[in-house]
Image (cartoon, rainbow, N blue to C red):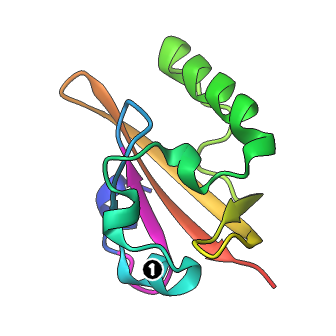
Amino acid sequence: MKIEQVQARTDVPVISVDHRGYVTAINDRFREAYGWEAADLVDRPLSTIIPKVFHEAHHLGFSRFLTTGQPTLLEQPLQLKIDARDGREQVAEHYIVAEERDGAWAFEATIRPLG
């Protein structure tokens, strides 16, 4: 799946992240599902929505991918937790894609709530 295909989804929560690990956009479904507004997240680290216990693992995996370009978690459904705006941790199915654009990686993910 290409980034444009994920960005076009309006039926599931979608988040866009740049090569620095900063949020660049969310869609309306993301806002509805997790309570975050674009102003809360855009230009902030993705770790804003990742439970603190997973920050180190996220940073290590993200850095490893940027260094090697070898994906281990991309383009497969993953059950991971996300922090909603109200502080609740929710289990969600993440599906992440990445593309290199103008020498930098861009990431797009659907994050569908489970349960």
Q: Going by the picture, which residue comes out furthest to the front?
A: 86
In the picture, measured across the screen, residue 34 lies left or right of residue 26, that is right
Residue 68 within the segment the image draws in magenta = no
Circle 1 residue = 31
- Marker count (numbered): 1
Residue 15 within the segment the image draws in magenta = yes
Residue at the spot 67% in from the left edge and 23% down from the top edge: 60
Note whether residue 17 is visible.
yes
Q: Going by the picture, which residue comes out furthest to the top?
A: 67
Give, as a three-letter code, the residue at label 1. Arg
Residue at the spot 33% in from the left edge and 68% down from the top edge: 38
Give the image quarter of residue 104: top left
Give percent across and percent down for residue 97: 48, 48
Residue at the spot 72% in from the left edge and 29% down from the top edge: 56
Q: Compared with residue 72, is residue 32 higher up or lower down, i.e. above or below? A: below
Q: Secondary structure at mark 1?
A: helix
Q: Compared with residue 70, is residue 12 higher up or lower down, i.e. above or below? A: below
Q: Which residues are magenta?
A: 9-17
